[in-house]
Image (spheres, grey):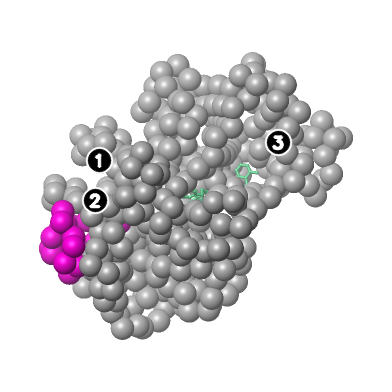
């Protein structure tokens, strides 16, 4: 069966493998109907994510049909149509029990991460041996551990794959950014990055009643999508973000969301930052966010960071009484509620989809998504049945 393998920097290949089989009695095997490429996959694609081995199967956002279940799976049946959670949770540990599923203590036994971060981090599909070494779901078939916990049943057949697919990751991720930021009625929000995660963060900020939403990026097609969701936009390649934000919203936004992460593109470095930071060390987005955020405001870091970011402006952070929160999505805590909102037609996350391609063309799709060429924002990969 078809799988997408990582072979090295900018080198992913379509390949053939035997179908996965049940190895634990809580597993399910899913016949994948749709999967996608996520900004997180680009960290591997660009060779920045450590712990990868040649031929690792990648991908962590998918849905499909349950083909078989282990003897200890209680709530999921063969033939169910399901969305798969990107983070793999056990459902039993102290973190899972309190709804913090992406902090699961059980699903990733990487000793390296435990040493680096002082604690175990959660497992994830298709995301290197530092997150458990699980085979990914950019594939025709995928094995899902703890199937009762990591699968969401979609009972309403009027919903298309495209409408619910992103519940596996980015719809929940963008919601989590809004939750961490405390976005609610009347809030002002600035969101760095108008990729799929940033755009869905705009969608949810609007839904939650934000008064003004600012979207910051340098790609016009993406900024146009942000405007279509009600955001005001700033092109960081043309204007200075700090000066512009201060002019557009004196006093600063209540909430800043970093939906970019550590692979940011350097824009214009503000003169104040240039004076105090080493150019090479400027943590651009966090530096901008700490500077513009309202006193007493909140910064939510949903873009991925790995290890360190130097020269964090801890002075402004401390003196301005800023709250900063980070984290991976709590998929299983959110997806039931968010599914209802989608089902009711209150939001439509499909506005980010620009391309639909066959899984067997994933190598091309990666290149387009990485280069942001041909207006690419989100690519859905379809399995040919
Ligand atoms: P993407 O690469 O499509 O989008 C990133 C966007 O940021 C691009 O449009 C880029 O032009 C823009 N950008 C780059 N530098 C910038 C700057 N200095 N200022 C403002 N914008 C800038 O990726 P995506 O799919 O939207 O994912 C975004 C991030 O979210 C990634 O780091 C990804 O790993 C992370 N992520 C986190 C979680 C989580 O649970 N925490 C889940 C999914 C994805
Ligand atoms: Zn993702």
Task: Identify the residue shown where x is 27% and y is 52%.
Answer: 149
> Is residue 75 rendered to the left or right of residue 195?
left
Label 3 packing within 10 angstroms: few (<14), some (14-19), many (20+): many
Task: Identify the residue shown where x is 55% and y is 35%.
Answer: 325
Q: According to the image, label 3 marks what residue?
A: 287
Where is residue 61? Give x, y as percent: 37, 57
> Is residue 231 rendered to the left or right of residue 246?
left
Residue 152, disc: 2
Ligand 1 is within 8 Å of the C-beta of the residue at disc 1: no
Q: According to the image, label 1 marks what residue?
A: 336
Quick check: 234 above or below 211? below
Label 2 packing within 10 angstroms: few (<14), some (14-19), many (20+): many
**Label 3 vs label 2: CA separation?**
38 Å
Q: Is residue 112 magenta?
A: no
**Label 3 vs label 1: CA separation?**
35 Å
> Is residue 339 rendered to the left or right of residue 312?
left
Q: Secondary structure at mark 1?
A: helix
Task: Identify the residue shown where x is 43% and y is 38%.
Answer: 176
Quick check: 374 above or below 233? below
């Amino acid at each position: 069966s078809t799988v997408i393998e990582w072979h090295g920097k900018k080198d992913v290949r379509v390949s053939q493998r035997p179908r996965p089989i049940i190895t634990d009695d809580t597993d399910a095997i899913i016949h994948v109907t749709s999967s996608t490429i996520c900004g997180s996959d680009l960290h591997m694609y660009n060779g920045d994510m450590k712990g990868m081995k040649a031929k690792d199967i990648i991908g962590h956002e998918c849905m499909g049909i349950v083909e078989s279940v282990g003897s200890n799976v209680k709530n999921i049946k063969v033939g169910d149509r399901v969305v798969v959670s990107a983070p793999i949770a056990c459902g039993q540990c102290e973190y899972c029990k309190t709804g913090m599923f992406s902090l699961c203590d059980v699903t990733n036994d990487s000793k390296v991460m435990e040493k680096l971060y002082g604690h175990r981090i959660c497992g994830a599909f298709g995301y290197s041996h530092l997150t458990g070494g699980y085979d990914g779901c950019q594939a025709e078939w995928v094995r899902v551990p703890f199937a009762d916990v990591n699968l969401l049943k979609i009972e309403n057949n009027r919903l298309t794959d495209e409408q619910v697919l992103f519940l596996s990751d980015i719809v929940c991720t963008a919601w989590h950014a809004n939750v961490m930021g405390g976005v609610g009625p009347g809030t002002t929000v600035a969101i760095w990055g108008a990729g799929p995660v940033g755009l869905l963060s705009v969608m949810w900020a609007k839904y939650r009643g934000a008064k003004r939403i600012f979207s910051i990026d340098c790609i016009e097609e993406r900024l146009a999508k942000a405007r279509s969701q009600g955001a005001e936009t700033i092109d960081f390649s043309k204007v200075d973000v700090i000066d512009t934000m201060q002019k557009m919203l004196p006093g600063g936004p209540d909430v800043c969301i970093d939906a970019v992460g550590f692979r940011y593109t350097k824009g214009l470095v503000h003169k104040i930052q240039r004076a105090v930071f080493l150019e090479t060390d400027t943590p651009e987005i966090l530096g901008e966010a700490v500077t513009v955020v309202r006193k007493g405001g909140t910064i939510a870091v949903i873009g991925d960071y790995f290890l360190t970011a130097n020269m964090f402006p801890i002075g402004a952070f401390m003196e301005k009484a800023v709250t900063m929160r980070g984290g991976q999505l709590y998929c299983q805590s959110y997806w039931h509620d968010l599914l209802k909102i989608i089902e009711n037609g209150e939001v439509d996350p499909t506005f980010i989809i620009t391309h639909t391609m066959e899984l067997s063309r994933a190598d091309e799709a990666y290149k387009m998504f990485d280069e942001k060429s041909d207006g690419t924002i989100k690519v859905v990969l379809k399995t040919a049945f």
